[in-house]
């Protein structure tokens, strides 16, 4: 019996070493999934269809034709006009995110093709300060709308944002009016604008260009709104409905036009563009 206990205790001390990054946990169903399987499935959980957040560069690869991207506005760099500081200076925070993401700002603007159709596209990256809209993001969206207007090309914007960037104060809030006016000029000319909402899309972004599309598409289960549910409940003093602010809830209540899986997004956008020509 002593021999058995000794052998058993030794075996219990053994640990199987699993290399990091092989498995990931789904934020929705909590299943542990083989990462390569998620990669093959376009960063979508094969168990419950939860759409993981992806970077702007990954989004462009999935949405537009390979080799068609011609970026513009990349020389527009953020500054620190207010000398803002929270736990660290805003200028340092910008440098940290630039090193972390490899981006200069939270949005990429480009001319590209979707199934051979020329478009102007903007993709917001949540990894860069929560995709917040400061002066540079607002300027890139406005430039994209102006380029779409000048060249009579459809505009496609993919949003993923927590809202306006607090470190730029009123200057960030002013972007809401600027981008809305630029998109309004597209509507006056009858140039189509497709807005794609991903998880999450909130605040000043949802209150401006994200909800101004001629066609508004959302990925499944994306959280979309202005303020978060906790703030709303505290304000109105009522319990919110189940799945409030999820894409499916918004579709049911007529706030967006369709919910589309990531694997079907490119084909869906191309089909809409052909119809709107």
Image (cartoon, helix red, strand yellow):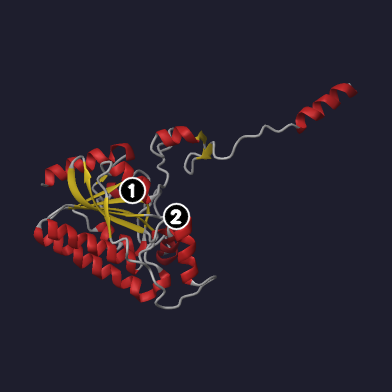
| Discs 2, 1 touching: Cβ within 8 Å | no
Q: Where's residue 86, x and y in %?
A: 51, 72
Q: Where's residue 164, x and y in %?
A: 37, 66
Q: Where's residue 87, x and y in %?
A: 54, 70
Give the quadrant of residue 137: bottom left
Q: Along the polypeptide, which appears first: circle 2 or circle 1?
A: 2
Mark 1 — residue?
247
Callout 1 environment at 10 Å: few (<14), some (14 to 19), or many (20+)? many
Q: Is residue 246 visible?
A: no
The N terminus: image quadrant: top right
The mark total stands at 2
Classify residue 196 as left or right of residue 35.
Answer: left
Classify residue 34 as left or right of residue 70.
Answer: right
In the structure shown, which secondary structural element does the residue marked by tag 1 occupy? helix
Classify residue 146 as left or right of residue 77.
Answer: left
Residue at 15 percent across and 53 percent down: it is 153
Viewer-nearest of discs 2 and 1:
2
Q: Where's residue 116, x and y in %?
A: 18, 41
- Measured in 3D between alpha carbons, the distance from the residue under mark 2 to the one under mark 1, in whole angstroms, is 27 Å
Give the quadrant of residue 264: top left
Callout 2 environment at 10 Å: few (<14), some (14 to 19), or many (20+)? some
In the structure shown, which secondary structural element does the residue marked by tag 2 occupy? helix
Q: Report the disc number at residue 30.
A: none
Q: Nearer the viewer, residue 72 or 194?
A: 72
Q: Is residue 121 above or below residue 4?
A: below
Residue at 24 percent across and 45 percent down: it is 68
Q: Report the disc number at residue 101.
A: 2
Q: Is residue 82 above or below residue 22?
A: below
């Amino acid at each position: 019996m002593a021999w058995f206990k000794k052998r058993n205790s030794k075996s219990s001390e053994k640990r199987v070493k699993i290399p990091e990054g092989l498995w990931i946990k789904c934020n929705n169903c909590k299943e542990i999934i083989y990462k390569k399987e998620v990669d093959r499935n376009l960063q979508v959980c094969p168990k419950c269809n939860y759409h993981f957040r992806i970077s702007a560069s990954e989004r462009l690869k999935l949405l537009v034709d390979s080799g068609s991207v011609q970026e513009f506005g990349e020389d527009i760099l953020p500054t620190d006009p207010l000398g803002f500081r929270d736990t660290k200076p805003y200028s340092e925070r910008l440098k940290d995110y630039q090193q972390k993401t490899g981006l200069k700002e939270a949005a990429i603007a480009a001319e590209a093709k979707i199934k051979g159709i020329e478009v102007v596209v903007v993709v917001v990256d949540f990894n860069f300060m929560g995709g917040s809209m400061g002066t540079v993001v607002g300027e890139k969206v406005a430039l994209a709308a102006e380029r779409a207007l000048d060249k009579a090309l459809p505009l496609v914007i993919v949003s993923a944002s927590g809202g306006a960037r607090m470190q730029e104060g009123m200057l960030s809030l002013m972007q809401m009016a600027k981008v809305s006016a630029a998109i309004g000029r597209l509507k006056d000319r009858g140039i189509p604008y497709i807005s794609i909402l991903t998880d999450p899309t909130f605040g000043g972004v949802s209150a401006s260009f994200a909800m101004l599309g001629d066609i508004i598409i959302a990925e499944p289960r994306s959280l979309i709104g202005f303020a978060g549910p906790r703030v709303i409940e505290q304000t109105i003093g009522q319990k919110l409905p189940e799945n409030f602010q999820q894409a499916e809830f918004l579709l049911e209540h007529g706030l967006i036009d369709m919910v589309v899986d990531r694997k079907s997004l490119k084909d869906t956008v191309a089909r809409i563009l052909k119809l709107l020509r």
